[in-house]
Image (spheres, rainbow, N blue to C red):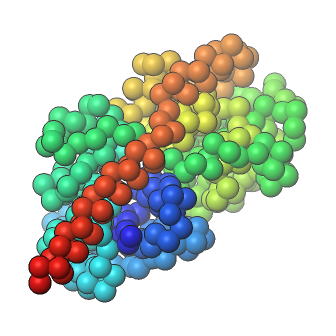
Amino acid sequence: MRVVIAGGGTGGHLFPGLALADELVKRDPSVEILFIGTDRGIEARVVPREGYNIRFVSGAALVGKSLSGKLKALFSFIKGLRESYRILKETEPQIVVGTGGYVSVAPVVAAWLQSIPVLIMEQNTVPGKANRFLARMANAICITYQESMAFFPRDKVHLTGNPVRDRVTKGSPEAARRLFSLKEDLFTVLVFGGSRGASSINRAMVEALPYLTGIKEEVQFLHQTGESDYRFVRGAYQDMGFKGTVTPFIYQMPEAYAVADLVISRAGATALAEICVTGKPSILVPYPYAAEDHQRANAEKLMQMGAAVMILDKELNGKRLSEEILRLFNDPQKREEMKRKALGFGRPEAARKIADIVGSIASLKQESVRCLKTTG
């Protein structure tokens, strides 16, 4: 079986695809997986590192652009469509999986034009414009939240959850402490703003440090900053004398989750799926410019369940963030309750469910091809 997985740009659209790829290969090592993405996205460096092949096509975001930006995005899409069409002609996959976002649009449209079955994955409560457009071309749509069902044709929808890489739940705290130079007996706060970092979270965390000096000897931080804020944030921790590790990007997220007592994060769907399956108490700061404000909807759902604390980006500052950190630091019972609620919301079986659907659709495609060859 040959499967093309199209999507990327950010970790939120890439890592569910990687989770699915891992599950498919675990079931059948002979499965051929090809990723299609852009050379500017996170997929360019992460997919080869994970051992999968990737081909690059043109593409650009359309939402939120000026008229000239929209025209450039349109030309980029047309170019990407031609490139995707050629790649699919060469590889002849049994199915194309779109993981959402603008990167997936051209490959999915190219698949539809060639009558290749399509499955799309929607991670958020409020689906993005790309997936709403592609839904009419899809054979199956796998959603994370019940609320998403209203946006898609009911007969195509499967409520599966957002797939998380199996190894995310199998990180070793001991390996994490060696890897990130962390101490065993300290309360560990994992801070990350998504695959590119988040400047508002970085600034608020730096501003929070003076308010946290009272627990300086009892706490340590593992902070993913993104490239642009790395030196600034690392310098702040060093100047204030806090323990921990600051890095532009964390490749070993299973270990990062394993060692964390508290997570501070944006509210992208993939981050939330990983937080839930690992049962981590969290402080969520939704990205305020996400399409349809979907990160706020994601975070509100967890907050209402008691699995997370939410701070809106416009309300985020060092004092507020430090207050929430201290409150959770001083209340182990609350953290344990949040852990139970998060685990109850996690969907560790999501990758298996989607792999079942992929296998079923691909088998039908293979059978159809065999029948055509026989009758021909």
In the rendered image, the vertical position of residue 282 relative to residue 29, given as above or below: above
Question: Can you give x and y, in whole percent of width and height, for residue 82 in the image?
Answer: 21, 83
Q: Is residue 126 visible?
A: no
Question: Can you give x and y, in whole percent of width and height, for residue 212 in the image?
Answer: 74, 29
Q: Quadrant of residue 275?
A: top right
Q: Is residue 30 visible?
A: yes
Residue occupying the point 46% across, 23% down: 303
Residue occupying the point 45% across, 47% down: 352
Residue occupying the point 31% across, 86% down: 90
| Location of the C terminus (image quadrant) | bottom left
In the rendered image, the vertical position of residue 367 relative to residue 208, given as above or below: below
Relative placement, left or right, of 161 versus 93 is right
Nearest the eye: 345 or 270: 345
Relative placement, left or right, of 197 versus 365 is right
Q: Outermost residue, front direction? A: 374
Nearest the eye: 247 or 56: 56
| Location of the N terminus (image quadrant) | bottom left
Question: Can you give x and y, in whole percent of width and height, for residue 286 in the image?
Answer: 43, 38
Q: Quadrant of residue 103?
A: bottom left
In the rendered image, the vertical position of residue 54 relative to residue 278, given as above or below: below
Q: Quadrant of residue 36?
A: bottom left
Residue occupying the point 15% across, 59% down: 137
Nearest the eye: 280 or 244: 280
In the rendered image, the vertical position of residue 358 relative to residue 209, given as above or below: below
Question: Can you give x and y, in whole percent of width and height, for residue 248 in the image?
Answer: 64, 59
Relative placement, left or right, of 133 versus 172 is left
Relative placement, left or right, of 32 versus 142 is right
Q: How many marks?
A: 0
